[in-house]
Image (spheres, coloured by chain):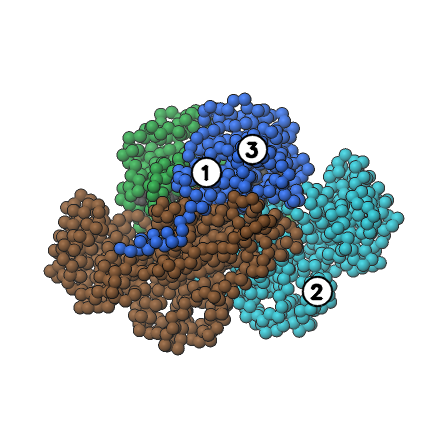
Chain colours: A cyan, B brown, C blue, D green
Amino acid sequence: MVKEIFTFLVGGKAGEGVKKAGSVAADVLAGMGRNVFQMDDYMSLIRGGHNFSVVSSAPRKIYSHYMKADLVVCFDKRSYDNHSDQVAEGGILVYNSDDKDGMNGMGVPLTSEAKKYPVRNLMFGVGAVAILCAALGYDKKYTDDLIAQQYPKGTEDNQAYASTIYDHVFPEIGGKFKLEEGDTVRRIVFGNQAIALGAIAGGLSVYYAYPMTPASSLLHYLAAQAEKFGLAVIHPENEIAVMNMAVGSSFTGAKTMVGTSGGGFALMVEGFSLAGITEAPVLCVLSARPGPATGVPTYTEQADLNFALSAGHGEFLRIVASPGTLEEAFYLTAQMLDLVWKFQTSGILLTEKHLSESSTTIELQPDNIISAGGVEFQGNGYKRYLDTEDGVSPLLFPPSHEVIKWNSYEHDDLGITTEDPYWISRMHDKRNKKIDALKKYMKSINTVNVYRGEHPSNVITYGSTTMSVIEALKYGQINPTVVQPVYLNPFPVWEFEEFKDQTNIVVEQSSTGQFADLLREKAGIRIKEVIKRYDGRPFDPMELSKKIKEGL
Amino acid sequence: MVKEIFTFLVGGKAGEGVKKAGSVAADVLAGMGRNVFQMDDYMSLIRGGHNFSVVSSAPRKIYSHYMKADLVVCFDKRSYDNHSDQVAEGGILVYNSDDKDGMNGMGVPLTSEAKKYPVRNLMFGVGAVAILCAALGYDKKYTDDLIAQQYPKGTEDNQAYASTIYDHVFPEIGGKFKLEEGDTVRRIVFGNQAIALGAIAGGLSVYYAYPMTPASSLLHYLAAQAEKFGLAVIHPENEIAVMNMAVGSSFTGAKTMVGTSGGGFALMVEGFSLAGITEAPVLCVLSARPGPATGVPTYTEQADLNFALSAGHGEFLRIVASPGTLEEAFYLTAQMLDLVWKFQTSGILLTEKHLSESSTTIELQPDNIISAGGVEFQGNGYKRYLDTEDGVSPLLFPPSHEVIKWNSYEHDDLGITTEDPYWISRMHDKRNKKIDALKKYMKSINTVNVYRGEHPSNVITYGSTTMSVIEALKYGQINPTVVQPVYLNPFPVWEFEEFKDQTNIVVEQSSTGQFADLLREKAGIRIKEVIKRYDGRPFDPMELSKKIKEGL
Amino acid sequence: MDDLGTNAENTWCPGCGNFGILNAFKKAVLKLEEKGIQRENIVISAGIGCSAKIFDYINLSGIYGLHGRDIASVQGIKFANPDLKCVTFSGDGNAMGEGLAHMLFAAKRNADITIIMHHNSVYALTTGQVTPITNKGWKGPSTPRGSVEEPLNPLTLLLEAGATFLARGYTAKIDHLTDLIEQAIEHEGFSFIDVLQPCVSWNNTYKLYNELTYVLEDEPKTHDEALKLSRRIDKLPIGVFWRDEKPPFHDALYGSLNPSINSLSREKRLEMITNLLKF
Amino acid sequence: MDDLGTNAENTWCPGCGNFGILNAFKKAVLKLEEKGIQRENIVISAGIGCSAKIFDYINLSGIYGLHGRDIASVQGIKFANPDLKCVTFSGDGNAMGEGLAHMLFAAKRNADITIIMHHNSVYALTTGQVTPITNKGWKGPSTPRGSVEEPLNPLTLLLEAGATFLARGYTAKIDHLTDLIEQAIEHEGFSFIDVLQPCVSWNNTYKLYNELTYVLEDEPKTHDEALKLSRRIDKLPIGVFWRDEKPPFHDALYGSLNPSINSLSREKRLEMITNLLKF
Ligand SMILES: Cc1ncc(C[n+]2csc(CCOP(=O)(O)OP(=O)(O)O)c2C)c(N)n1
Ligand SMILES: Cc1ncc(C[n+]2csc(CCOP(=O)(O)OP(=O)(O)O)c2C)c(N)n1
Ligand code: SF4
Ligand code: SF4
Ligand SMILES: [Mg+2]
Ligand SMILES: [Mg+2]
């Protein structure tokens, strides 16, 4: 059986190596030159519960996992209950016969075999990998080498275990799946890694963050890379410190970024407003999860949009952009770092758990990256808040013979506090000029992705949902035009003129349809239907394609 | 000379009794049965600088101070420089001849006379009061009594000083202004006092706040009234504590309110979102000043509108309403307290320095007040988040045999944490139902004030700017219809149908025109012109009436 | 005791110290019931973290608050209804990191609440980062080269802030911990228990604590003795470190008023306001 | 010295203790210049309050931050450019109230910054409310019946948090204060000066401080002595209370890296990333 798309799903308890098995599967499939997309679904706990990892692959670029899998491996009864009906036609279901028997599919004694070894940690995952290897027709040598490479701890036990499991399943499923090889072997990158690398490429020097899912892996990745790239990566006492420290660091000219999720961002908004009035270039990565409040920490949602668009008291330029794919996350992060420096203001890279924590094969052109910059002052008589034609004042950094004052109060052009009506309104005007200047600049760059289709209607979406939409259209072989605003504030209305009165379907992960409202309210878009999902799970391309078809 | 409107303006340094003189003047004028409006303009400092107080009065209800004054008293040169061109036709300018002489107007040796007394604190203010009494034709006895009543400390010195100043000016200006008496003597109330009294009337039990101008006087007033009314009024370590404590208090059934300005509110938004998901009834008074960040603490602006409308991560019902007058502030605060309890959610009473800190004669009908309420549970098997038709679950408070769990995580109907897609989307739906239920309810109450006029066009405004608009129209004798949405979220679009395509002029105190955008985007209002002011000062009715005339 | 549990799925790692806290707390509630404190008068709160999950497992009313803010919310409950016994379960990251100011101020004002701090020296639920009380050198994902900071000491800080009841317990000494929890809840005023809580997944300290802990024979008599004891690291005393008497905040501020109950009637309020607005 | 001032209008009350801090600071800068520390290498910050207005009056670069957050912002400056000497002026409400956690953590991590705390025991700019270090009984507008809380002690808390330089000064002893400021700025690591600052408008403590303050002869040698001294209230010692040596945070975390200067070139970064993405 040769299939274009091949999906592997592995489910079990946290601590059993589910995610790792998914990653290894992704590597195996990527090693065939295929493109892969891995989505990890896990609960907010450390051991137990129910996690699963699903890896879809294709010779072509693939934008989403599929919930119907060709090979499903379940470590326990709960996984079985959750996933036994997600086996694709002609697919295989493998379950742990020690946990419950007499079920459909193929039973494998994962537990009793594992018990023969001292360290059982992650071992089920190793078993899943062995099952995958067998199903794909790889031999034992390949499997052994793979285990050696991917499980450096306790390799021998793991190899022995893998071998047993392999032998168990091979007779029945060996070589069941013949997959087309792809053109080239690509790196797999996870979303927050793409963001981190984009930031570094764009010139990042300092990163502050307090851990918060799903932004934590950005902190972890950057902390691990700090020494190599000469970065300061700091985890302070709380998010308020994070934002206020970031303003301090940007004062020195260091390109500074912070990252968090909704609750942490809520704590940052006072400092965000500080960045607004001091005109401090600070970029915040806001990776959303379902809210309000603590919400559902390890799942995905797009419900922080409105909050992001108007976060912070008072009026100032907030640049908000959201990447549609992991590739875009890489370039866009660098571009946003550039923009906050060019326009000296605060910016938000808005993303979601689904992008931050999913992985995919990726081809990046680091050379295409934009490096963050800004106008630097030359000469004497520096005025921090010089009112210029576009409202952007030249920058200067300490140490300097000139005095550079950033001020959280309203101020005159020297940065000295004022209560004078003249300066109050003038500084409002100055800052507002930057909004116009940015809009003008945005007209010279790509702010909306348009994937032209032949069907005379459009699907409008944004953020990580873009990936779901693209894959759904591919799967469903429908081709409306896909319109994805990358920039959300200022909203690039000028790009929407042509779509305004066409048949538009909006797809988003929010319960109130914030994005649809934004389109209607800011760009006057007529909307036929809004497809929403807000149970914390990303869209599945099959289901979504059906919904889009119905809507068109 | 008999005038309808009489305005008294007194200017000097902080600490010289400027504001007190304004209040005494307001009392004097109110004592004549007239209506008064007092606006205090002061810098963020304790001694020195330049403050002024302006009190306008009329036999009819008056909605604003006027910047052209009939009697101007300047304590120092700076005041003279600021206000000497603000004397109305036929008006009188009195200045301190010890600070600078040879100027227009009438010089009085305020300083050298004051030096004769040990305590000079506030004494200039006493002088200003004496000047007012003389100009209004009050005799010395009246003046003496007034001083005794208003300046209980150092009364005799103050009376002696007042007498000297009175004698100085009487020959020239004695009885210059003959004012029409009004119908009845009314109480003078300041904005935050109206809010405080409205809250108390509505059932307030607990108030938390951290001081922040222009919300501080709400804390101070409530702290002073706490014992009398049996309230807990607490000033904790910061605004984050304030909001999270408030959620805790509302858990017990106590009607709880908090108050702050933009920067403090920014710190509260995480807790605000907590109120959203726990469905905690909490009312926040957000009294705005110019931003961003520290901005201009003692001045006025309406730039926190968008922030208030979507504050907090995630999706939940945020009720936002803004009073147009001090009377409305009284009733609306009680009504908002009621609504947050009825719909178990967080609400914002959005106001501005101009309302919070201005004073006016007021006639209140406490009986018209609404008392805060909510559905209370009866019976057994309590479920905190029972999904009902309108999404509102019955309330129950500890101690109870039933278990009552409020949860910041997404939860099932018992309030137990969940990651189950079923409950996640169901609870989103449940909370969203409250939005619809509230909208339905809002259709049964007054959500938009419409002051019908004869001119075939409308002036749309909100918040304290409403007062400026009404007075400007009275002054300019123009009568377009004034439309003032009291509720801003959910926005009462249904009330705007008739105005949509008419000639609309918007008046607001923001630099980007947030309110105009809201009208355009939410209600599809066609807008001819937006009149904005954003130098921290409220509109002056004369100037504003000119602008409105031009716009019509 | 069973009915003090809930149907929520327990998602702690097998062997986690948090089980000890759960058991000790339930036992303490039963004992308090014997003494006449009804369970419905005990309300609980929790921040966010593994520790905080205990909220779902105890069948008592309360608020599952925000990370670091439970200490504020639980005070809010107390201040509005002083009749309730208010306990919050705080992770060490929660209480000493995000929530440090709230805890110190609760001690300062002698808020009549009980804080049970789950001391595992990691941000466990967010995968093992350093907390403010983690030892220098800790290699967590945010400090891959080892944390460079000295830990804070919760007990000495709280002593300086004016706490009136301070204790330390150990999850493996359930009866001892039960007793501490009972005393803490009974204490009128601020009470805090530093509970040594091994985290088997990120920081398994059972062996260490089994070796180092010992039960205090005598409670320190002076502030200085308490300080000294709190600083010990060669051995880890468990027991009551400090006890003092001061009027609780609500009492000092508004005496016997119970704001959630003693609300004036609508009529009374309106009458008083009408009078206030009359001349 | 004149050129250390600005054209900003000074809006402090005549006689305010803040003038003493302004003068002492300017003097200290001149003295440091004599020692070779150039003024452009000194940057300042401030929170919000009367105290913070000093930012406008000193002709040095820096950030006028948020209420309570200056201590975070000034650390942000330091961490990004460790070559700069970083000083912040914090009101006591600012440092001990809204900003308490930032201050304690700055001490804990030994951030190489100097905090000059204007100790006037009131929120002066917001009209005289109680601060966390105001004595019990204070009748401010938020505590009309008198505050019911005991004050915190900034020095003992900072000692417990691990501060490496602690001192107390008095605004009326300008030369002494100058000397303390100089030493604090020179100190490598966290430094804090508790400056007794009479507020003539809300809390005029000149008489009290003139009576109670005395200049310390010897610096305490031990932590215990420092604690004891910090607790004295019968007399108010001024001088250096504590001095310790520990590597400053930036140094411990990333050695000699100066993030704002030693940024890798674009080429180098892209090359490294390309390599990282290759097999
Ligand atoms: C404002 C905010 N920031 C960050 C988080 C993410 N977060 C959840 S739990 C936690 C740490 C928990 O550590 P601790 O309090 O020690 O609890 P433990 O898991 O160790 O019991 C963090 C940082 C959050 N929920 N909210
Ligand atoms: C978040 C926030 N809350 C409140 C305020 C209002 N505020 C400004 S200054 C101040 C207190 C200042 O007291 P302190 O720090 O002691 O300075 P002082 O005026 O006494 O020098 C407050 C509460 C603010 N600016 N920001
Ligand atoms: S990670 Fe640690 S603290 Fe969390 S449940 Fe597991 S053992 Fe307990
Ligand atoms: S109010 Fe106090 S602290 Fe502020 S300037 Fe006046 S004297 Fe100084
Ligand atoms: Mg912990
Ligand atoms: Mg102070």
Say which element carries label 2.
helix
Residue A140 in the image: state x and y as whole percent: 84, 45
Which residue is found at the position 38% from the left and 73% from the top? Answer: B452
The amino acid at mark 1 is Ala
The front one of A279 and B176 is: B176
Kind of residue at disc 2:
Ser
Front residue (pair B178, B375)? B375
Mark carried by residue A545: 2
Q: In what quadrant of the picture does the N terminus of chain C appear?
A: top right
Work out which residue is located at the far top of the displayed protein and give it. Answer: C217
The residue carrying mark 3 is C34
Q: Which badge, 1 or 3, is on the more N-terminal residue?
A: 3
User: In 3D space, how far apart are the residues under numbered discs 1 and 2 (Cα atoms)?
Assistant: 57 Å
Residue toward you, B402 or B411: B402
Mark 3 lies on a secondary structure that is: helix
Residue beneath the point at 40% across and 70% down: B450
Name the subunit of mark 2: A
User: What chain letter is assigned to the residue under label 1?
Assistant: C
Report in which chain the residue with disc 3 lies: C
Asked whether residue B41 is in view, the answer is no
Q: Are marks 1 and 2 on the same chain?
A: no
| Direction from residue A505 to residue B70 in the image, left or right | left
Gap between marks 1 and 3, in whole Å?
Answer: 25 Å
Q: Using the image, tell me which numbered label, if any, was put on residue A313.
A: none
Residue neighbourhood size for the residue with mark 2, other residues' Cα within 10 Å, grouped as few (<14), some (14–19), many (≥20): many
Residue toward you, B24 or A282: B24
Residue bearing the label numbered 1: C111
Identify which amino acid the numbered label 3 is placed on. Answer: Glu
Return the x and y of residue A163 as percentages of the image width and height: 83, 42
Q: Mark 3 to mark 2: distance in Å?
A: 62 Å
Which quarter of the picture shows residue D4? top left
Alpha-carbon neighbours of circle 3 within 10 Å: few (<14), some, or many (≥20)?
few
